[in-house]
Image (cartoon, rainbow, N blue to C red):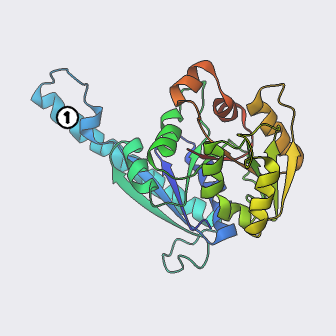
Amino acid sequence: MIRTILVPVRGDGKGDNVLAHAAVLAHRYDAHVTVAHCRPRPEDLMPYGVHIPEFLRNQIVRQSYQVADQEEEGMREEVLVLAEKLRLDLSGDNIGRTATVAFLAEAGRQVDVIKRRGRLADLIAVAKPDRDRNLGHNTLKAALFHSGRPVLMCPHAETPPATLGAHVSLAWNGSAEAARALSQCISVLRTADAVSILSNGSDSGPGTSAEDLVDFLRLHGIAATIVKFDSRGKTGRELLKASAAAGADMMVMGAYGDSHERETVFGGNTQTVVDTATTPVIFNH
């Protein structure tokens, strides 16, 4: 079951949408949300390999602290407002008994904060990367490749979804990546009202078919339905279409069977889902 959710933020305007998605899950599971603001360190802002006079270096340090303090105070106030709007308890007295939230400020690069804080989170919630503005790719990549935890990608939404986790779809092809997604998210499947297995009929041989998965889940007390989809189109797009047609509010899938760089350059099922998803997806790598 999801009891802890990490939401890394850095003042790019996407944190409120991600927190709204995390809040829906927090209410479902009585989970605790940690909003982690990643403060840039002055040394991370210094140009590499360029000599800087001491007076200029001191000025950059002072100004960077001032900017970081202002940004942190703004983020803290925003979390206070959002917590009330999203009905998240900020008192710190009811963690584990209801949907709660806490604000955490930590100095360092966001990718490093995600690595450290994410490893003891049940779920890391991040914004869907913005390819046009080249925002969010490193955040998603750090969460997926360096935390060892499931990552919820939240597409932009004018209003947060009414439910998440009520009807979950699982992308299945019998691969090691799909099996890892199943293992890491089986508690999400167990608490769902409905589970749909998305399959185009391909698998890794005997013992890995969608039918075998139905039997496996039944032993875990999970009733699942197989949803077949046509594999003649782009598999990533067809997965999303099949998930939406089944009525799922969230999809679970293994991510980047090929390397992230190869899929980014040449395309791949995961990258297609990252680029085109309009509903939340939990990735596992």
Kindly indicate the quadrant of the structure image that contains residue 57. top left
Q: Nearer the viewer, residue 22 or 42?
A: 22
Relative height, residue 174 to residue 192 (above, below): above
Q: Quadrant of the N terminus?
A: bottom right
Q: Say which residue appears at 66% left-offset and 46% top-offset.
A: 178
- Seen as rendered, the residue at the extreme front is 206
Q: Say which residue appears at 51% left-offset and 25% top-offset.
A: 261
Q: Quadrant of the C terminus?
A: top right
Task: Examine the rendering and report whether any part of residue 1 can be seen.
Answer: yes
Residue underneath mark 1: 59
Relative height, residue 59 to residue 89 (above, below): above
Mark 1 lies on a secondary structure that is helix
Amino acid type, residue under disc 1 in the picture: Gln
Q: Nearer the viewer, residue 214 or 185?
A: 214
- Lateral position of residue 102 relative to residue 162, left or right: left
Q: Nearer the viewer, residue 40 or 217?
A: 217
Relative height, residue 56 to residue 203 (above, below): above
Q: Say which residue appears at 62% left-offset and 39% top-offset.
A: 128
Instruction: Report x, y in % for residue 120.
Output: 45, 61
- Lateral position of residue 34 relative to residue 195, left or right: left
Kindly indicate the quadrant of the structure image that contains residue 2. bottom right
- Seen as rendered, the residue at the extreme left is 54
Instruction: Report x, y in % for residue 42.
Output: 26, 39
- Lateral position of residue 171 relative to residue 245, left or right: left
Q: Nearer the viewer, residue 4 or 192?
A: 192
